Image (cartoon, grey):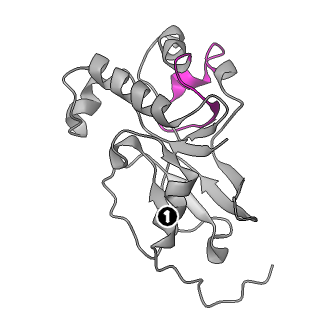
Amino acid sequence: MSTLFYSDPHFGHANIIKYCNRPFESVSEMNETLIKNYNSKVQPNDTVYILGDFAFYREPEDVTKILKRLNGIKHFVFGNHDKIMRHEKVRPFFKAMSNFEEIYVQQKAGGSQHITLCHFSMKVWNQSHRGSWQLYGHSHGTLPDDPNSMSIDVGVDSHNYFPVSFEEVKEIMSKKTWKPPVYDTAD
């Protein structure tokens, strides 16, 4: 079982193709590619944290048709375009839904990694002074990566339209030059 992260697929959103210069001729092509890419990495028992802006449909049945096709045990962090995701027909597809989440991911070598999940990028977050990570979406790859910050954009536009595994995030974070701030960190 793996842990993966995913944000901003914008299923059903025609304008996102031009706004983000996505390489798709149609919404149908985009949706099918996103589903194929997602399922190529996410197995049925994997845990996936989806960080918002999932779908642009007016009817919950359109959203559930997509969700039925996606593997994994899904957790959802709401973004700014997720009113439809709060619908009672959509909620059962998720183990948990929240506006913000803090998780611990067990590492294969032992120990755990604290991660703050939010649709939006943050400058600081709980335990950031102790090496906690922050994963976000929303920006569609437009924010420059800060090599001194333990945060990254896990949106599909930043990762070739695929989810990002914990191991991939760990590899990205290992290349950062983060150093804890020089102030008293006593709790």
Write down the region rendered in magenta: 68-90
Q: Position of residue 61 (x, y in %)?
A: 52, 8
Look at 61% across and 18% down and name the residue there.
90
- Residue 86, quarter of the rendered image: top right
- Residue 3, quarter of the rendered image: top right
Query: Closest to the observer: 129 or 66?
Result: 66
Amino acid type, mark 1: Glu
Q: Position of residue 69 (x, y in %)?
A: 52, 18
Camera sees residue 115 = yes
User: Residue most toward the front?
Assistant: 109
Query: 102 above or below 11?
Result: below
Q: Quadrant of the N terminus?
A: top right
Q: Is residue 136 magenta?
A: no
Q: How many marks?
A: 1
Q: Main secondary structure of the magenta part?
A: loop
Q: Position of residue 100 (x, y in %)?
A: 64, 47
- Residue 162, quarter of the rendered image: top left
Q: Quadrant of the C terminus?
A: bottom right
Q: Is residue 74 magenta?
A: yes
Q: Pointer 1: residues within 10 angstroms few (<14), some, or many (20+)?
A: few
Q: Position of residue 16 (x, y in %)?
A: 28, 32
Look at 44% across and 14% down and name the residue there.
58
Task: Answer left or right for 57 relative to 187.
Answer: left
Task: Answer left or right for 56 relative to 171.
Answer: left
Camera sees residue 140 = no
Q: Which residue is mark 1?
A: 171
Look at 67% across and 32% down and name the residue there.
45
Query: 169 above or below 77?
Result: below
Disc 1 element = helix
Query: 108 above or below 77?
Result: below
Query: Closest to the observer: 152 or 119?
Result: 152
